[in-house]
Image (cartoon, rainbow, N blue to C red):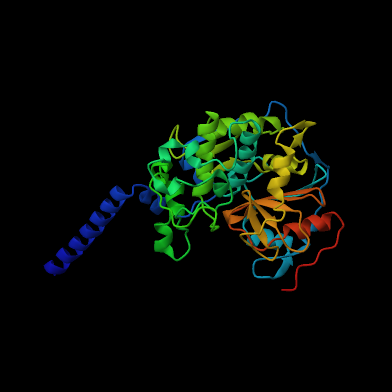
């Protein structure tokens, strides 16, 4: 019995020593273990830099009685089942869903504790904000060309040969060739993934300076967080301002926003996680959609260059490097652009079902915040239905 107790004691001691060594070797792993997969409010555990709201608020028009027919309107979920939207809302654990057409709120639905003013992280939807800022930096001359090398702006990366030929366009296209391990492949792989590392580390710059090159820049597309994080670092070095300051001064305060937004930092005064930690309210995220529906204009003023907006939401003759869902969404300029037979709509998308969807054909903006997401792509069907236009899902 004493031997058994001693063996148990040694076993637990070994486990404790193992984790102690592990967390000393990679301190961020303690946060990965504690928080695991982040949710819409995990951002509260990290330092934030506020993006101050506009001095004058733009308000979407609200009727005294919004439409309720969308509750029974059938859409398709990720299992290809046709279900009423009210059930889609429950299955996806949706927290907010707003449909705006011609500046009027046609439909809105919220879960308990949520409203259009609840600050929520939109995860990878942050990448599209980086795209907007890059267009501004080019327009204002802070960045000279997308063909510039990343080391032209971040000389600290020069000692690492991986960055020798990487351009800003490579980063914008997610074709940097840099090594990046996603979360797919089981619990252990997710635990040690680069996705977890860059979300939870307290020193993104130190991690970026160690990354390896696995493909020739510009040749292989891979969806990853480090490319937009590097672009965020470029923006800070090029403009001399933090990402939050630059976004506030050049976009957020100029489009009638009602609430402060924020960017999450790796540590106080550190680098913004421009890949997955932008916090925003649903009603103000819709104003980003409105800005792009107007090709960068707000109140008669050109806020974002029209050419950049058009270039960002249309891939033109470029060969799509990715294809997602029945709508065949291609990732382009850090936006998702459907490429099926009838295109023109586009979206900023984040994990767990965060969406900013824009449909120029019907002048519609849809915002979705969720804890899970029910899958598929119901937004086009909803936008066409509320505009009185026909829509059919593809047969395959």
Q: Is residue 372 visible?
A: yes
Q: In the displayed structure, would residue 209 be above or below residue 324?
A: above
Q: In the displayed structure, would residue 35 be above or below residue 51?
A: below
Furthest-left residue in this view:
2
Q: Is residue 289 visible?
A: no
Q: Quadrant of the C terminus?
A: bottom right
Q: Quadrant of the N terminus?
A: bottom left
Furthest-bottom residue in this view:
396
Task: State the residue at coordinates (53%, 32%).
Answer: 238
Task: State the residue at coordinates (73%, 45%).
Answer: 310
> Camera-side residue: 83 or 191?
191
Instruction: Judge left or right: residue 255 versus residue 218.
Output: right
Provide residue 61's location: percent of width, then percent of height: 81, 39
Provide residue 120's location: percent of width, then percent of height: 59, 44
Instruction: Judge left or right: residue 50 versus residue 163.
Output: right
Residue 145, by quadrant, is top right
Provide residue 268's location: percent of width, then percent of height: 44, 33
> Camera-side residue: 169 or 59?
169
Furthest-top residue in this view:
55
Furthest-right residue in this view:
388
> Camera-side residue: 310 or 93?
310
Instruction: Judge left or right: residue 167 versus residue 18.
Output: right
> Camera-side residue: 269 or 319?
319
Residue 249, by quadrant, is top right
Task: State the residue at coordinates (73%, 41%).
Answer: 307
Provide residue 60's location: percent of width, then percent of height: 78, 39
């Amino acid at each position: 019995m004493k031997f058994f107790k001693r063996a148990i004691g040694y076993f637990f001691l070994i486990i404790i020593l193992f984790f102690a060594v592990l967390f000393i070797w990679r301190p961020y792993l303690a946060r990965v273990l504690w928080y695991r997969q982040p949710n819409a409010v995990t951002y509260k555990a990290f330092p934030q830099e506020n993006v101050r709201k506009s001095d004058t608020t733009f308000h979407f028009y609200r009727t005294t009685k919004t439409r309720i027919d969308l509750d029974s309107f059938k859409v398709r979920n990720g299992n290809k089942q046709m279900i009423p939207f009210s059930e889609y809302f429950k299955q996806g654990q949706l927290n907010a869903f707003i449909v705006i057409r011609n500046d009027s709120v046609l439909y809105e639905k919220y879960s308990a504790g949520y409203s259009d003013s609840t600050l929520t992280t939109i995860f990878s939807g942050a990448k599209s904000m980086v795209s907007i800022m890059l267009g501004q930096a080019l327009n204002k001359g802070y960045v000279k060309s997308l063909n510039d090398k990343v080391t032209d702006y971040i000389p600290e990366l020069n000692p690492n040969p991986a960055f020798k030929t990487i351009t800003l366009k490579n980063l914008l296209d997610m074709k940097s060739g840099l090594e990046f391990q996603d979360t797919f492949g089981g619990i252990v792989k997710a635990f040690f993934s680069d996705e977890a590392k860059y979300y939870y580390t307290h020193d993104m710059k130190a991690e970026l300076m160690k990354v390896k090159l696995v493909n020739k820049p510009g040749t292989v597309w891979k969806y990853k967080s480090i490319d937009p994080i590097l672009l965020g670092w470029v923006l800070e070095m090029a403009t001399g301002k933090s990402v939050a300051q630059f976004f506030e001064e050049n976009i957020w305060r100029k489009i009638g926003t009602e609430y402060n937004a924020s960017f999450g930092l790796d540590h106080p005064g550190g680098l913004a996680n421009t890949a997955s930690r932008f916090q925003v309210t649903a009603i103000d995220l819709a104003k980003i959609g409105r800005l792009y529906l107007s090709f960068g204009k707000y109140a008669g003023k050109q806020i974002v260059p029209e050419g950049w907006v058009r270039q960002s939401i249309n891939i033109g003759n470029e060969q799509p490097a990715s294809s997602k869902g029945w709508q065949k969404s291609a990732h382009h300029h850090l936006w998702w652009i459907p490429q099926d037979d009838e295109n023109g709509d586009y979206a900023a998308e984040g994990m767990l079902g965060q969406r900013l969807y824009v449909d120029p054909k019907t002048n519609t903006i849809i915002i979705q915040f969720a804890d899970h997401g029910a899958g598929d792509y119901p937004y086009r069907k909803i936008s066409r239905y509320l505009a009185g236009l026909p829509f059919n899902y593809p047969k395959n």
